[in-house]
Amino acid sequence: MKDETRNIRREIPQQTANRRYAIPAILFTPQRCQIIAAAFFLLMLAIGAIPGEAQALSDAFGDKLLHLCAYSFLTCLLFGGLSGSIADRAWRTIMTIGLLGGLDEAIQSFMPYRNASTVDLALDMLAASLTVMALILVDSSRRRSYQSSPHNATRPAEKPN
């Protein structure tokens, strides 16, 4: 009775199973994602600290668009750098983006040529929320396509002779 059917699906290593999303797993390991996220955030702070540089970028591309793009990218990296269930990674990513966005705005408030804005923090959180939802949708669609693929089928039970 135990072996009525055999599951012939390939087993996926746990690290790969937890990482089925838009970022290629080979190029962006969790450790690399964390390092790149930290470097990117420090780069954002450094560019913002150069007098006139942040204003020039805002004039060229739009301040709000820059916030959405930068924090969406940062969200992808943070989400990829965390382990655990999808829901756990999602809330931890959004909370981390909230802390980093708040830190960014707090630093801006101390610079005479910059101004902090709660609208910018709200856009950071919006970018994080929308990006996490997109990553969850990509993950769930990949799981569905993997489960319905031919190599994941089960064989009928073998009849004893």
Image: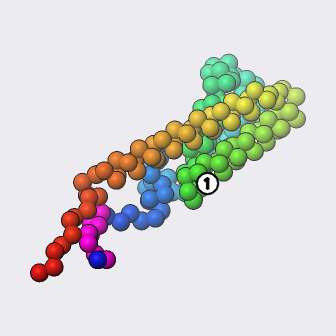
Compare residues 31 and 47 and report the one nearer the observer: 31
58 relative to 9, above or below: above
From the top left corner, tell me how far across and down residue 28 is, in percent: 50, 52
145 with respect to 61 (left or right): left
**Residue 66 lies in what quarter of the image?**
top right
Crowding at mark 1 (Cα within 10 Å: few <14, some 14-19, many 20+): few
* Residue type at the position of mark 1: Asp
Q: Which residue is found at the position 88% from the left and 35% from the top?
A: 110
Q: Which residue is found at the position 73% from the left and 42% from the top?
A: 98
From the top left corner, tell me how far across and down residue 39 is, in percent: 65, 48
Compare residues 54 and 71 and report the one nearer the observer: 71
Compare residues 36 and 126 and report the one nearer the observer: 126
Helix, strand or loop status at disc 1: helix
Regarding residue 46, the answer to whether it shows in the image is: no
5 with respect to 118 (left or right): left
For the record, the magenta segment spans 2-9
Q: Is residue 117 magenta?
A: no
Compare residues 80 and 139 and report the one nearer the observer: 139
- Location of the N terminus by quadrant is bottom left
